[in-house]
Image (cartoon, rainbow, N blue to C red):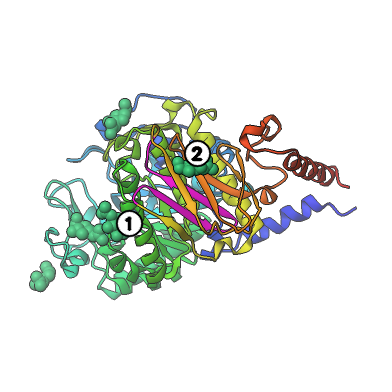
Amino acid sequence: MVNLKALAISTFFFVSSLAASSNDWRSRSIYQLVTDRFALTDGSGPACSTGDRVYCGGTYQGIIHHLDYIQNMGFDAIWISPVVSSFEGPSAYGEAYHGYWPQDLYSLNTHFGTGQDLKALADALHKRNMYLMVDVVVNHLVSKASPPTFSSFNPLNEASDFHTKCLITDYNNQTEVEQCWLGDDNLPLVDVNTENDEIVKTYYDWIKTLVGNYSVDGIRIDTVKHVRKDFWPGFASSSGVYTIGEVLHNETSYVADYTNVLDAVLDYPTWFPLVAGFQTQFGNLSDLSRVITASQGAYKNGLFGTGSFLENHDQPRFPSLSNDTARLKNAISFPFIHDGIPIVYYGQEQGYTGGPDPANREALWFSGYAQDKDLVQHIKTMNAARKAAIAANSRFLSVPMTFPLASETTLAVSKPPMLALFTNAGVSGTASWNLAKSGFNGNTRLIDVLSCTVVTTNSDGSLVANTTDGLPQIYLPVSALPSSSNICTGKLGTGNSASGITTSSLMVVGLATFAWLLMEIGL
Ligand SMILES: *[C@@H]1O[C@H](CO)[C@@H](O)[C@H](O)[C@H]1NC(C)=O
Ligand SMILES: *[C@@H]1O[C@H](CO)[C@@H](O)[C@H](O)[C@H]1NC(C)=O
Ligand SMILES: *[C@@H]1O[C@H](CO)[C@@H](O)[C@H](O)[C@H]1NC(C)=O
Ligand SMILES: *[C@@H]1O[C@H](CO)[C@@H](O)[C@H](O)[C@H]1NC(C)=O
Ligand SMILES: *[C@@H]1O[C@H](CO)[C@@H](O)[C@H](O)[C@H]1NC(C)=O
Ligand SMILES: *[C@@H]1O[C@H](CO)[C@@H](O)[C@H](O)[C@H]1NC(C)=O
């Protein structure tokens, strides 16, 4: 008999050796981590005070040892902080533990492990059909001294390889944003002269070999708006993989241009109204839908392939802005029904509360990597629901999300076969969603994957839903529930009539489970 498993595995390895494109990434879900703060090689949990801004000991081997933790939540890609070497010892703003102060592009930061360790991480991910995204910095190199020691840089090492020093003061002057320096006099970020053809070629060659040497599947690019736009297409094509850029700006019209020069951007224009919308009960969810609709129209590929996130290493964590658990669950759920790729910043699943940098870079080992936490389960369910939606409707990844309802306090997002109902009412708030068009046919049985409650659309396809606990409701048709998934496992069986679960839905699930069992035992 043909060994199908071996065949599948060998096919997979063949496929995984090919560069991952934007399309390959669309269905993925990304877990972002700061390597230094994620896990140690020996599994120990040393002290790590974020305010000290020093290395705490995280490594690539540490990540490898905790891939089960990441994969169990349903993620199939990780984004790690920059890998190239930085200066040693303290600067005016501490050590370079986060990686965003590159000094030598051609050597790796040995705090995190060797090149073999990094390659081993890529291999371990690929064996699990997971992707590796590496963060890269082009805009600047950084030395500990001020004024900078140009000779400490590699491969550029002369003052003429950089723009003449001027610190950015006017962010409305794009020339200044591109050619002056980030940082300050205590620690200037030395701005690479990306107007020079030789230097451009150096960077294109560098990214090509970095991606190749370590089997990288995608790159996240730092400070993209600080380098001229026409530098990027050649850089992206030299990388040969999916490119997603950080353009930290709140205006869709400003960010949109960058979607023409890279595969995608991190969706900052949506992030601003996302945070503001759910931070208090006075936020405006209608404004969130307005910005999304504008971005869908302005970006090259709409919002497909963009990175949708609630937290990252540069911004205060959401719970530092709002302690309402219901609003938090609404906000955390949102990236999973967005057209783009959901990105969860490590620690969010453990309820970490760090404020602005450096407080938002807490060591994950203090959590014990607990998997029974409420938010871990919540994220696991959201990943499973999105995968189920993709499996049930291949157009999930190409049909733009629409808003059957958008008010200051309530929002309905339709992306068949998923319907998500959000509110910023909070734990003790009430809200109702009255949808003339739910996006489903009449008499369709829907299950809220979070509460496992079943509702049925009215005969005209309309739907009225209420909440008294402020939680989001994420609906999938009962018929779209996969036979084996993390969704409402074991909960349907204990359902009561008050939650609307009928015998017929139990039979559907039962039959599906039976069919799945038959497949598993090879019949
Ligand atoms: C913008 O910044 C550049 C570089 O600093 C400067 O030469 C130019 O005069 C500025 N333009 C305006 C309109 O201020
Ligand atoms: C990749 O490996 C080659 C061969 O060892 C080496 O020449 C090149 O510098 C490496 N690239 C990077 C970015 O480390
Ligand atoms: C973006 O931020 C600036 C500065 O805070 C503000 O003036 C502007 O109105 C914001 N734009 C949008 C679209 O929110
Ligand atoms: C909420 O946002 C919508 C869309 O941007 C806007 O029309 C409305 O006036 C805003 N509501 C308030 C109270 O600001
Ligand atoms: C929420 O609670 C955390 C931890 O107790 C605290 O650090 C944070 O400041 C609180 N945030 C708000 C907005 O109250
Ligand atoms: C939802 O609440 C509204 C207004 O409070 C009420 O009229 C309606 O009957 C409720 N619907 C459901 C399905 O509970």
Q: Which residue is mark 1?
A: 287
**Quick check: marks 2 and 1 in contact, CB under 8 Å?**
no
Residue 517 occupies quadrant: top right
- Residue 416 is inside the magenta segment: yes
Q: Nearer the viewer, residue 254 or 202?
A: 254
Categorize mark 1 by other alpha carbons within 10 Å: few (<14), some (14-19), many (20+): some
Residue 263 occupies quadrant: bottom left
Q: Nearer the viewer, residue 85 or 349?
A: 349
Tag 1, which secondary structure? helix
Left or right? Give the position of 83 relative to 155. right
The magenta stretch spans which residues? 408-426
Q: Which residue is mark 2?
A: 63
- Residue 475 horizontal/vertical position (percent): 57, 48
User: Can you tell me whether the CB of the residue at mark 1 lies under 8 Å from the nearest atom of ligand 4?
Assistant: yes
- Residue 164 is inside the magenta segment: no
In the displayed structure, 435 sits above or below 295; it is above
- Residue 469 horizontal/vertical position (percent): 45, 34
Left or right? Give the position of 523 relative to 166. right
Looking at the rendered structure, the kind of residue marked 2 is Ile
Q: Which mark is residue 413?
A: none
Q: Nearer the viewer, residue 63 or 330?
A: 330
Left or right? Give the position of 68 relative to 330. right
What secondary structure characterizes most of the magenta part? Answer: strand
Categorize mark 2 by other alpha carbons within 10 Å: few (<14), some (14-19), many (20+): many
